[in-house]
Image (cartoon, helix red, strand yellow):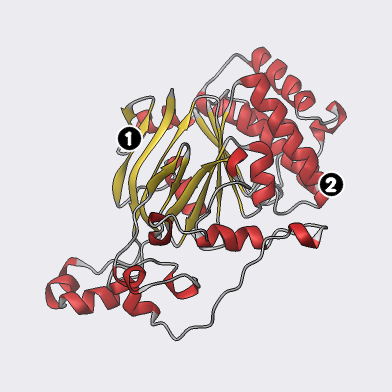
Amino acid sequence: MELLQVNGLLKHYGTPTLTESINLSLKQKRRRSSPPALDGVSFTIGKGEAFGLVGESGSGKSTLARLICRMDTPTAGQLLWNGEDITELRGKRLKGFRQHIQMIFQDPVSSLSPYQTVEQAIREPLRNFGLGSRSERDILVQELIKDVGLDPKLASRYPSELSGGQNQRVNIARALVCKPSLVVCDEPLSSLDAPMQTQILTLLARLRDQRALSYLFISHDLLAVQSLCDRIAVMYRGAIVEIFDSSQMSVIHHHPYTKLLLSSILIANPLKRHQWKETETEKDDKATSEEGGCSFYNRCPFGTPLCREVKPQLKLRERGHYAACHELDDTSDL
């Protein structure tokens, strides 16, 4: 059953004001307005599902996370939570809803107050939402400290006295203390070393099973996403260009951008590495975007005149696999 449904989310910054819009021609408006941060993003997350989102910096992943957590409002589109439209929630209704979706942020240190102890940081959401009595809060906080793998002796410590991995465990405990249904993990591994990344991934997998959690797991690391998630979506320039089951990653014909991401994975055996070659072109990026073609056209070695002129739509290719690519329309062996 669908827990979250995202329908055609659009987020646009830098749109001309009404007065400017009246005085500008259509061509001038196109030049004045920046490309959308999100361009018609649609997908679903089921109950108990871990849904991965990958893409390079600037692709719109964090913007999408903020919209889903209702930390920002979309320019257009719709968010459905258990079938209920939450796109326009305001005031008390929005505050009440937020306890159901919590976020784990990228930087484990800066996302915590330097003036709060571990215990205070984890307890604060309970106080904000008015959940539980004082004794109930004490018990829940102590249980969570142990459950995320922290020594109870650290409860009185401050973030500056902890390692990056310990601080991220505090963030995870703080996100779970209100018993949310969905946890948005926004690059939670990027500030950690490799051994700690593995530990945090293992912790997230265990907590998901124990608490029947759903995840939106955002990362640029395809292997990390594959190890945790049931399905993976690939974003490029504000749009989802491919969605596939994690088990399909090595057996399907991928979108060219996904192939580029796969080629960046470090694999010890050179015979098993993905091969990719970007082509140097003289393609006009602005012209491509104005004419509505594929946003990856300028970097794609398979680009055709059709790709330049017509934006490909996300289509079902085979069971569980969706991709937006004209070459895949022709069942080409990319």
Give the residue furthest to the bottom.
282
Q: Which residue is mark 2?
A: 195
Q: Is residue 112 visible?
A: no
Q: Dot 2, how many residues are within 10 Å of its Cα: few (below 14), some (14-19), or many (20+)? A: few
Q: Is residue 173 visible?
A: yes
What numbered label is drawn on residue 89? 1
**Front residue (pair 63, 173):** 63
| Mark sitting earlier along the chain (1/2) | 1
Closest to the camera, between mark 1 and mark 2, is 2
Residue 5: x and y, percent?
Answer: 38, 34
In the image, residue 277 above or below residue 12: below
Q: Is residue 326 left or right of residue 142?
A: left
**Front residue (pair 142, 280):** 280
Q: Secondary structure at mark 2?
A: helix
Residue 269: x and y, percent?
Answer: 82, 58
Determine the residue positioned at 74% across, 32% down.
Answer: 203
Q: Secondary structure at mark 1?
A: loop
Determine the residue positioned at 48% across, 45% down.
Answer: 243
